[in-house]
Image (tube, rainbow, N blue to C red):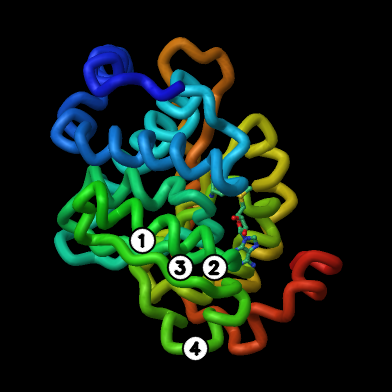
Amino acid sequence: MIYTKEEFTTRFSLLCEKADLSELGLPAKDKLYTICEQLDLRSKQFNLTAITEPEEVLKKHIMDCLFTAQCIDGIATDGMRLLDVGSGAGFPSLPIAAALPNINVSAMDSTAKKTVYMNETAALAKIENFKAHPARAEEAARGEMRGAFDICTARAVARLNVLMELCAPFLKIGGHFVSMKGAAAEEEMKEAESAAKKLGLTFVEKCRYFIPEMDDARFLLIYRKDSKTPESYPRNFSQISKKPL
Ligand code: SAM
């Protein structure tokens, strides 16, 4: 069962305080509560996320994504365009849009019913700077969204070398790719060195953070697009996954 709004506010405020995220998180708390409420309600109707227990939703979805929003806040300027690839039930895209109303957030997922869910949730939460698009990244990256974004994010979609080929084409030159990773971050970075080079990405920073009351470290891997991604990328998905760059 989901937290009541009062329970949510109490727990959320405490976690924000422990994580030093109060300034970013608290103004968005009503929107974030609606995201949790909708996730609970709609997960009973179709398979949206493996995480449904309220304390886990709060920590592993909301708090985790707020750390990403904080990092993006450091590189974003008003009106910037962000794309979240493989957004699923809206993570990290919905919490980022709730916490950073000054940027435009697009979310993409290959499952159309997830994008319908995200758009309905954004409307109910009054998150106006958000739009979800049903598409496969490797197909959309060949259309008008190519080279159109300042920031591209992704969590739990694919290994880094595969993800880079899906995300880099969407970025403008000078734009940033922000990948949310767990314990395998270092290993995936090494594995993705050649992909980064071929796609025009330069490593900028690895940020380590801890969700309060949880032991495992999480990482934000940040790359900047310094040169144009060759037109031959992205390839079709079977080539990308069978023969990562
Ligand atoms: N990012 C969300 C999260 O962290 O909760 C969802 C993660 S879920 C494990 C992976 C999502 O990526 C799924 O919703 C799937 O439909 C989507 N996906 C996988 N490959 C994709 C592709 N090539 N283009 C767009 N979406 C994709």
Mark 4 close to ligand 1, CB under 8 Å = no
At mark 3, the secondary structure is strand
Circle 3: residue type: Lys
Q: Earlier in the sequence, mark 1 or mark 2?
A: 2
Expressed as whole percent of the image width and height from the top left, the position of residue 77 reads 18, 59
Q: Earlier in the sequence, mark 2 or mark 4?
A: 2
Q: Identify the mark nearer the N-term, 4 or 1.
A: 1
Q: Which mark is residue 119?
A: 1
- Which residue is at a point 29% across and 33% down the rendered structure image? 33
Q: Distance between the residues labelled 2 and 4?
A: 18 Å
Tag 1 near tag 2, CB within 8 Å: no
Looking at this view, is 127 or 46 the one in front?
46
Of the two numbered discs 2 and 3 in the rendering, the one whose residue sits closer to the viewer: 2
**What amino acid type is highlighted by mark number 1?**
Asn
Gap in Å between the C-alphas at discs 3 and 4?
Answer: 19 Å
Amino acid type of disc 2?
Ala
Instruction: Report, in whole angstroms, how far the alpha carbon at label 4 lies from the one at label 1.
Output: 22 Å
Question: Depth-wise, is mark 1 or mark 3 nearer the camera?
Answer: 1
Name the residue that disc number 4 marks: 143
Front residue of 244/66: it is 66
Q: Nearer the viewer, mark 2 or mark 4?
A: 2
Q: Name the residue under label 2.
A: 112
Q: Which residue is drawn at 32% across and 47% down?
A: 96
Q: Do the residues labelled 4 and 1 touch (CB within 8 Å)?
A: no
* For marks 3 and 4 on the same chain, the one whose residue lies earlier in the sequence: 4
Depth check: 35 or 143 in front? Answer: 35
Q: Which residue is disc 3 drawn over?
A: 225
Amino acid at dot 4:
Gly
Residue farthest to the right?
A: 242
